[in-house]
Amino acid sequence: MDRVLRVVVVDDSAYIRKVVKEMLSRSPFLEVVGTARDGEEALEVVDRLKPDVVTCDLIMPGSGGIEFIRRQMAVRPVPIVVLSVSGESSERGLSALDAGAVDIVQKPTALASEKVFDIADELIATIKAAAAAPMARVREPLHAAGPAISTFHNRFDLVVIGLSTGGTQALKSVIPRLPADFPVPIAVVLHMPIGYTEAYAKRLDDASALTVIEAREGEEVRSGMVFVARAGRHLTFERDARGTVRTRLDVSPLDTAHRPSVDIMFQSAAAVYGSRVLGLIMTGMGEDGRDGAAWIKAQGGCMLTEAEESCVVYGMPRSVVDAGLSDYSAPLELIAEAILERI
């Protein structure tokens, strides 16, 4: 980075404000220039200081985090990273992303302990990525109707999708645009904190003709279904003695940067389905999915990537493109069509 990013920290806890400031001071490229105790004060502080990024708690007295995000986006869009405890606030977290927040970082539940500092690296990386996010792309999903496609070529037996920062909104612009007679199952790894994937799958299901669920152990992988990997568990596939493919959930391997890992899911899909896998990498920071894409290509499968022009963060797709593993790139509004053309 060629400049120091100016950050405002919003949290009703003085302790958390102090700890977040200490965490961010570990990076020479971040400077906390102000803090706020609630959403109302945050609006004033952000207007006065005009920071590059804001971190925001969700549950605060008075004007809470979601109201602040909505009001701030209406006045002057600014990258906002939600920093909140999951479980008690998963629905709020998803609403914050709908309102315009770029990403969510999970607080440890034991707030008054050194465990808070365990998230320092993740928070710093997320803030840096958020600062570069084009705010025009952090938006409500497209609401176009699903394409009227009735003829399929049966070239693939599984679609696997990997995405991260910006992905919660991006996926809402893809899955709801697939028709009810889409003939193959879909599996998704989306980097989210533990406690959010079940609620997210339910919201995506409500908006889709396909059935969307958080993946469960031993579920039959069948057409008409979208399986969202459970946060904290890798999603893989196994063919039983009858030839039926079922989902497997596991904490192992433990040495991956993410759990669930896109690489792990892609590798398993290639091993079980061979050449009949269509992979897709969408917006997100990092390189998760690049090695898995190589497995899919090695087995004769096909890889799609989201084009840079529509990504909130062009990290994961770039890693696949730069490795020469992408067969085709499409902007977000054309991804559903690109999938349908190949299926």
Image: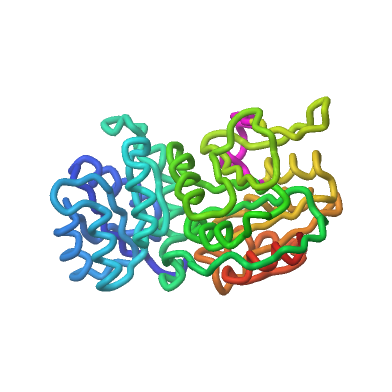
Residue 119 drawn above or below residue 7: above
Viewer-proximal residue among 67 and 164: 67
Determine the residue positioned at 65% across, 70% down. Answer: 330
Horizontal side of 330 relative to 240 (left or right) equals left
Viewer-proximal residue among 337 and 289: 337
Q: How is the image coloured?
A: rainbow
Horizontal side of 29 relative to 216 (left or right) equals left
Horizontal side of 237 relative to 334 (left or right) equals right
Range covered by the magenta-colored residues: 249-262
Task: Tell me where residue 311 appears, x and y as whole percent.
Answer: 54, 67
Residue 172 drawn above or below residue 223: below
Q: Does the magenta stretch include residue 259?
A: yes
Determine the residue positioned at 37% across, 35% down. Answer: 87
- Report the predominant secondary structure element of the magenta stretch: loop
Task: Tell me where residue 234 appears, x and y as whole percent.
Answer: 61, 36
Horizontal side of 44 relative to 280 (left or right) equals left
Task: Tell me where residue 337 appears, x and y as whole percent.
Answer: 66, 68
Q: Is residue 122 magenta?
A: no
Determine the residue positioned at 19% across, 42% down. Answer: 13
- Where residue 171 sits, quadrant-wise, is bottom right
Task: Tell me where residue 33 appears, x and y as whole percent.
Answer: 24, 61
Total marks shown come to 0
Viewer-proximal residue among 6 and 148: 148
Task: Please indicate, yes or no, whether residue 291 appears anywhere in the rendered image.
Answer: no
Task: Please indicate, yes or no, whether residue 225 appears anywhere in the rendered image.
Answer: yes
Determine the residue positioned at 53% across, 35% down. Answer: 232
- The quarter of the image holding the C terminus is bottom right
